[in-house]
Image: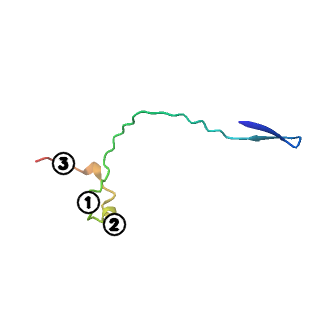
Amino acid sequence: MTETSTENGETKTRQVQRTQRNSVSGTVSRDFDDILIIASRHVTRKRLAELEPRHANKATPRQPS
C-alpha cells in the first residue's frame, strides 16, 4: 500500500505494509502417530535421546494379552 503525507510543503510517498486481523473460532483435529511421550520422571533426557530415532515402522502393535 502506498501512503502519501505532506510535511513543511513537501509531499512524501512511501510503501507501508498493513496487516488485517480477523477473529475466527472453531475446532482443529489432527492425528499424530509414532510420537514418543515421556511418561516417567525417572528417565533422563539423555537416555530418552538414546532411544531416538526409533524405527516405528518395524515395531509390532501392542498385544493386550
Q: Nearer the viewer, mark 3 or mark 1?
A: 1
Q: Is residue 10 above or below residue 49?
A: above
Give the percent coordinates (x, y) of residue 27.
39, 34
Q: Secondary structure at mark 3?
A: loop
Q: CA distance from mark 2 to mark 1?
A: 13 Å
User: Between marks 3 and 1, how big is the CA–CA gap?
Assistant: 19 Å
- Tag shown at residue 65: none
Type of amino acid under label 1 = Ser
Point out residue 37 in the picture as x, y percentages from the top left corner.
Answer: 30, 53
Decide if residue 63 is on the left or right side of residue 40: left
> Which numbered disc flags the more N-terminal residue, 2 or 1?
1
Labelled pair 2, 3 in contact (Cβ < 8 Å): no
* Residue at 36% from the left image edge and 39% from the top image edge: 30
Q: Which residue is mark 1?
A: 40
Q: Residue at x 33, y 66 (%)?
A: 46
Instruction: Kindly identify which numbered label has been placed on residue 62.
Output: 3
Q: Residues within 10 Å of mark 3 (few under 14, many from 20)?
A: few
* Amino acid, disc 3: Arg
- Corner quadrant of residue 6: top right
Classify mark 1: helix, strand or loop: loop
**Nearest the eye: 50 or 1:** 1
Q: CA distance from mark 2 to mark 3?
A: 26 Å
> Which is nearer the N-term, disc 2 or disc 3?
2
Name the residue located 28 percent from the left edge and 48 percent from the top edge.
Answer: 57
Q: Which residue is identified by label 2?
A: 46
Looking at numbered disc 2 in the image, what kind of residue is underneath it? Lys
Q: Is residue 32 above or below residue 51?
A: above
N-terminal-most mark, 3 or 1 = 1
